[in-house]
Each structure stands twice: as C-alpha cells, then as structure tokens.
Image (cartoon, rainbow, N blue to C red):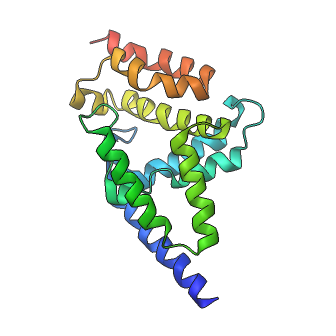
C-alpha cells in the first residue's frame, strides 16, 4: 500500500510542474500567457460544458480524463505552438520519451490506464479522442480572439493558417462547434 501511494504521490507532484509550462496563447483577458496546467483544466471544462456538441456515443467522462492528461508530456517536451516553427518528428519523439518517463512513475495498473488514454488522444482514432482533440483545437482561438489577437500577432497567423492547421481536427470532432468558433474568430482577421 505504501509503495502504491508513494508512486501515486510521485506522479502527482511531478505533474504539478505543468503549472509552470508557459504556452503561446494568452488567457482571455490578455494579461499573461496561459500555462499548460491551466489549459488542461480549461479544456476539461470545455468537455463538461460543451458535451452537447459531441456525437452520440461519446463518453464525456473519458474525454475529460484524456484532456486532463493530454499535455503532461509538456513537462519534458515543452509546448509547441501550432503556428510555430518546429520539427514535428523530433517533437513527437520528445513527447513519447516524456510519456514513457512520466507515466512510469505510476503504479503499473494506473500507468497502463492513463498511458492508454494519452495514446488514444494522440492517435485521434476514436470518437472520444476526436471530440477531445476538437476541444483542444477550439480553445486557443477563442482565447486569442478574446485577447484581441494574442499569439496570432506573435506568429503572423492568418485565417488560412487556422483553416489549415486548426480546422481539420476541430471539424472532425465537433463540426457544429467548429463552425461557430470559425464565425466568431473570422472578424478578427477581416478587421485587420
């Protein structure tokens, strides 16, 4: 029992570091950048509040669990802004190595369960994962728009960039939600 609690506690203390990983986009009021810990909490709430946007059969509890752990690899691999310049192969390798290390802190049964959810999110092949990935894609544009452009200005983002890099996953997992978000953010780009 003590070993199990030691391992669970070690994992929980390790993932506390996610609160210090700064992301590219600001929080909605534009006062500072969001952390990965805040992002994970926020998109989990997106799943809770926007559950009616999921396709029939999506298990919202599983989606919330995926979203709570989807970015823990950023503790080691850092945040990679979707509009930034990076090597996707190297980033994927860094994230896999981070997942191996971080999930191994847990007792084996929990490690298998949570790593399975993380792998499922990354693959994006299940309806649950597609919805989770859609929420992960719509949250940053909503924050950037609320903050008057946020990281879009920093990265020179255009609406075409969003349609290429954000829209496919967002539309695949939550088409009506993506259509709403797209309409909501488009004025930012037409006003420039």
Question: Of 90 and 4, which appears nearest the observer?
Answer: 90
Q: Quadrant of the C terminus?
A: top left
Left or right: where does residue 55 sit relative to residue 123?
Answer: right
Residue at the image point whose x is 41% and y is 54% from the top: 96
Q: Give coordinates of residue 39: x percent, y percent.
A: 45, 47
Q: Give coordinates of residue 83: x percent, y percent.
A: 30, 31
Left or right: where does residue 2 sit relative to residue 72?
Answer: right
> Where on the picture, by quarter, is residue 126?
top right
Q: How many marks?
A: 0
Q: Give coordinates of residue 78: x percent, y percent.
A: 31, 52
Question: Of 9 and 87, which appears nearest the observer?
Answer: 87
Is residue 131 visible in the rendered image? The answer is yes
Question: Of 68 and 115, which appears nearest the observer?
Answer: 115
Residue at the image point whose x is 60% and y is 40% from the top: 129
Direction top: furthest residue: 190
Q: Quadrant of the N terminus?
A: bottom right
Q: Give coordinates of residue 40: x percent, y percent.
A: 49, 50
Q: Is residue 180 above or below residue 18?
A: above
Q: Is residue 98 above or below residue 145?
A: below
Residue at the image point whose x is 48% and y is 73% from the top: 105
Direction bottom: furthest residue: 2
Is residue 32 visible in the rendered image? The answer is no
């Amino acid at each position: 029992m003590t070993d199990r609690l030691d391992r669970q506690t070690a994992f929980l203390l390790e993932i506390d570091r996610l609160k210090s990983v700064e992301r590219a986009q600001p929080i909605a009021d534009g006062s500072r950048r969001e952390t990965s810990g805040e992002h994970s909490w926020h998109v989990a709430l997106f799943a809770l509040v926007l559950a009616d946007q999921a396709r029939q059969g999506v298990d919202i509890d599983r989606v919330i669990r995926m979203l709570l752990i989807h970015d823990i690899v950023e503790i080691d691999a850092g945040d990679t802004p979707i509009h930034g310049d990076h090597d996707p192969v190297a980033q994927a390798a860094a994230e896999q190595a981070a997942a191996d290390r971080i999930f191994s802190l847990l007792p084996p049964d929990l490690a298998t369960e949570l790593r399975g959810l993380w792998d499922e999110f990354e693959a994006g092949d299940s309806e649950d994962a597609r919805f989770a990935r859609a929420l992960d894609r719509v949250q940053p544009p909503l924050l950037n728009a609320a903050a008057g452009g946020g990281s879009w200005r920093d990265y020179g983002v255009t609406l075409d960039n969003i349609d290429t890099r954000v829209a496919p996953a967002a539309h695949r997992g939550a088409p009506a939600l993506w259509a709403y978000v797209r309409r909501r953010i488009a004025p930012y780009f037409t006003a420039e």
